[in-house]
Image: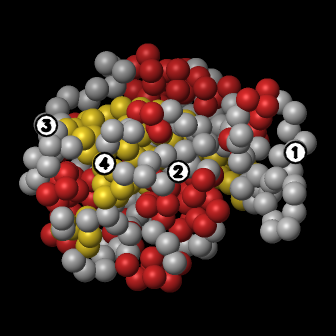
Amino acid sequence: MYQGSSTKQCLICHKELNQQQDLFHLVNNSSLCLSCIRKFKIINSDIRIQGYHVKVLYEYNDFFRQLLFQYKALDDYALKDCFIESFQELKRTYKNYIIVVIPSSQKDNKRRGFCPNVEIVKTFSQHIFTGLYKKEDYKQTKQKDRSQVKKILSIKEGNLLYKKNVLVFDDVITSSNTLQAAFQQVEKYHPKQIKALVLACPHIDYFKKHCAKQGLADLHEKYESIIRKVLENIINRGKGIEINTACMGEILEDTMPGLPILKLYKELGGSIITVGSDSHRPERVGYGFDEVYQKLKEAGFDSISVFKNRKNKQQPI
């Protein structure tokens, strides 16, 4: 909403909300229009990392990535209110928890004038613990070895967590190293229980990465019915999926998703599929693409999707 105006606008696209006469806006005092709400890909999934329950709300798709960039890098403070818009029940679920916030770069916080994660947490809780901190101004996105965050993260006034229900909060989970480091710090103070809440996670079979780390079997078969429903929803909405090589040759010898999910996606009628390496080092750009193309052919695909100016163009493999 612009200052001095009585017209309420969507926080993301600035469409006038006074014109929204749908049931949703009549029942909910929403700050977003329905069009923007539908761009959030809700997964509301539960996974386990180091034995701890982790709830993930959204898939880290292009829309979410751009939204988070606008909020954190372009300092669009008003967007803090949009991330929990579809999960108002979190206020009840975590009312008896202390929320331990994963810290941002102190340099960035000083520049923008606020801590992004803290402001998001304030939208569903006032029981916030900010004693977790980085001993160095470490930015994980710029690191070759992300596991180094375990040496950087520390805690002060941790005694406040003793015998308390603790919820660790972060915006995005990728390698999970930061979350694991936070668990290790919180554990020292013997809380009653530890859980985690993460806004977004990148891949449909992300759990496979952690299965490999802990020597567990791939859980694809166990959760195939859920994966099938997710893929059907993606296809029905005219969306697509990405095959990613980020873990190949390092944690896994496979792509994300792997061949079983690719075959299932094709069987259900999926046709939009992109290829990415999610590289954080120059030598990983385009890593394993030849193998990916062979795997796609095996799954029944003869082309991939290439987007330019938001338009999909099929490129033969």
Residue 143 is left or right of residue 75, and the answer is left
Give the SS element for disc 3: loop
Residue 151 is left or right of residue 230, and the answer is left
The kind of residue on which mark 3 rests is Gly
Residue 139 is left or right of residue 249, and the answer is right
Q: CA distance from mark 1 to mark 4?
A: 36 Å
Name the mark nearer the viewer: 1 or 3. 1
| Snapshot quadrant of residue 254 | top left
Q: CA distance from mark 2 to mark 1?
A: 23 Å
Percent position (x, y) of residue 232?
A: 59, 23
Give the residue number, with chain letter if any, for mark 4.
98
Q: CA distance from mark 4 to mark 3?
A: 32 Å
Give the SS element for disc 2: loop
Give the SS element for disc 1: loop
Residue extending furthest right? 19
The kind of residue on which mark 1 rests is Asn
Give the residue number, with chain letter if any, for mark 2.
123
Which residue is found at the position 26% from the left and 29% from the top? 218
First along the sequence among labels 1 and 4: 1
Dot 2 alpha-carbon crowd within 10 angstroms: few under 14, some 14 to 19, many 20 or more:
some
Which residue is found at the position 20% from the left and 29% from the top? 217
Which residue is found at the position 48% from the left and 54% from the top? 122
Give the residue number, with chain letter if any, for mark 3.
215
Percent position (x, y) of residue 51?
A: 18, 37
The kind of residue on which mark 4 rests is Ile
- Foreground residue among 93 and 229: 93
Q: CA distance from mark 3 to mark 2?
A: 38 Å
